[in-house]
Image (cartoon, rainbow, N blue to C red):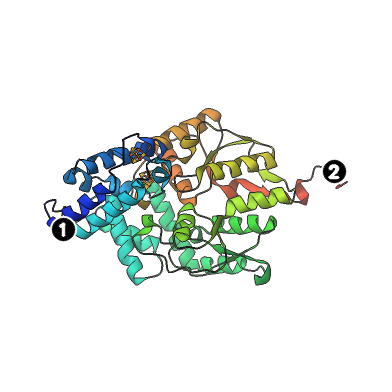
Amino acid sequence: MAVAVDDEALLTEFYALADRCRQCFQCGQCTSGCPSARSLEEGPRRLIRLLLSYDVEAVMSSDDLWRCSECGKCTDACPMEVEPAKIIAELRALESKYGAQTCPERHAADVATRRLEKHDRIDNLAFGVTMASKGHLPKDVLGAAGAVAKIVGQSFAGKQAACAAEAGRTPASAAHAFYAGCSLPQDNAARKLTHEAAATLGLPLAEASGAPCCGHPSRGAVPTRFASDEPVLTACPACDAGLREAGIVTTPLWEALVDQAERDDRTLVAAGDAFVPYVGCLGERDTALAALEQAAALAGIRMERAYPSLHAACCGALGGMYRGESEGARRLLDFAVEKQAPVVTTCLLCRDNLRSAARRRHLPVQIHFWPEFFRAAGPADTPEGATDD
Ligand code: SF4
Ligand code: SF4
């Protein structure tokens, strides 16, 4: 059912939103700053323009309402304090209230929201099955099949519990509060490497067990039920943004680890002599890129960088669902092929989406989540004959 664009109540709320954008002078800085702009149909500038011209139909039928990842970069960039990200979120809420579009992102958010109203977390397997039953089939069948096999294998073997127990062996008093999110616990290998990297760099983690969904909008419209009085380390940019929105003090684990390594004068070991960084659209791009550059220096390797927005462009999963290769992902992967270097990302979901894109094009490029590429140097890495003094 589409939105009834002549609904009086809808129009009243729509005009009120337009009023809040009056000072927009169409400078376009919002769209320039949007890491997902190449994957949006209108982009924030034009969406605001359509809103100001009272084009209810165009605005309310735009899939951009569901493709926007609510990263907030457009709001940061706006010199007129228009807050396009907030306006888009409110338009999205209006659309939910007065009708329903058929775009996959919209369905994904609906399915996630319904699930989160009843349960603390989203079961990715059940989520995928529900989406498929609504006709939204995965764009990367091979990748989806692999992910399903992995999740099923881990669940049946009870390995998740074993891994959590393994990971949680650190004495609680020395450990730092860690919110693992929903993707890391579904990849035991990556989870184990994450805990190992943290422990060896002096930041052992106490993982919040069974933590509820982070409440990021890409996972539905239900605020998080997770609470913490102490600062929390996060492994996922969406979790970082979602928890911060709920007033929890968060620090991306990766950035904390690199800082720790530098403070302790540690070196890192890398699985190659160069890499192309990718930080996704939700993290603090400049800070995340700086941390990766710092890691490259600590490992004595090269970070191959083009221009900042390429390394934060949409990975192809706007709204939480992989929709196929985005323009940004295509350019990033081409750049990595040209540099003959793997991509190293600070977001596990982005890793999987970029792998899907690379697989579809048979590109000779590897994509790593950061602990798959970097680790702390140990005694075995000391060159023969070298001593501490
Ligand atoms: S940055 Fe602000 S003023 Fe400029 S086009 Fe976007 S919303 Fe309008
Ligand atoms: S919130 Fe982020 S993804 Fe959405 S329009 Fe603004 S910059 Fe683009």
Can I make out residue 182 in this image? no
Q: Position of residue 120 (x, y in %)?
A: 40, 69
Q: Position of residue 336 (x, y in %)?
A: 51, 33
Q: Nearer the viewer, residue 6 or 364?
A: 6
Query: In the picture provided, is 190 more to the left or to the right than 296?
Result: left
As drawn, 276 above or below 223? above
Residue behind mark 1: 9
Residue behind mark 2: 386
Can I make out residue 70 in this image? yes
At label 1, counting other C-alpha atoms closer than 10 Å, the crowd grade (few under 14, some 14-19, many 20 or more) is few
Q: How many marks?
A: 2
Q: Kindly indicate the quadrant of the structure image that contains residue 195.
A: bottom right
Query: In the picture provided, is 107 more to the left or to the right than 172?
Result: left
Q: Position of residue 87 (x, y in %)?
A: 31, 50
As drawn, 179 above or below 280? below
Residue under the image location 50 percent in, 32 percent down: 307
At label 2, counting other C-alpha atoms closer than 10 Å, the crowd grade (few under 14, some 14-19, many 20 or more) is few
Q: Describe the element under mark 1 as helix, strand or loop.
A: helix
Task: State the quadrant of the N terminus.
Answer: bottom left
Residue under the image location 36 percent in, 36 percent down: 38
Mark 1–mark 2 CB contact (< 8 Å): no
For the view shown, which residue lies furthest in the left direction?
A: 6
Looking at mark 1, is its residue's CB closer than 8 Å to ligand 1?
Answer: no
User: Label 2 amino acid?
Assistant: Ala
Q: Nearer the viewer, mark 1 or mark 2?
A: 1
Q: Describe the element under mark 2 as helix, strand or loop.
A: loop
Question: Mark 2 or mark 1, which is nearer the start of the sequence?
Answer: 1
C-alpha distance separating marks 1 and 2: 75 Å
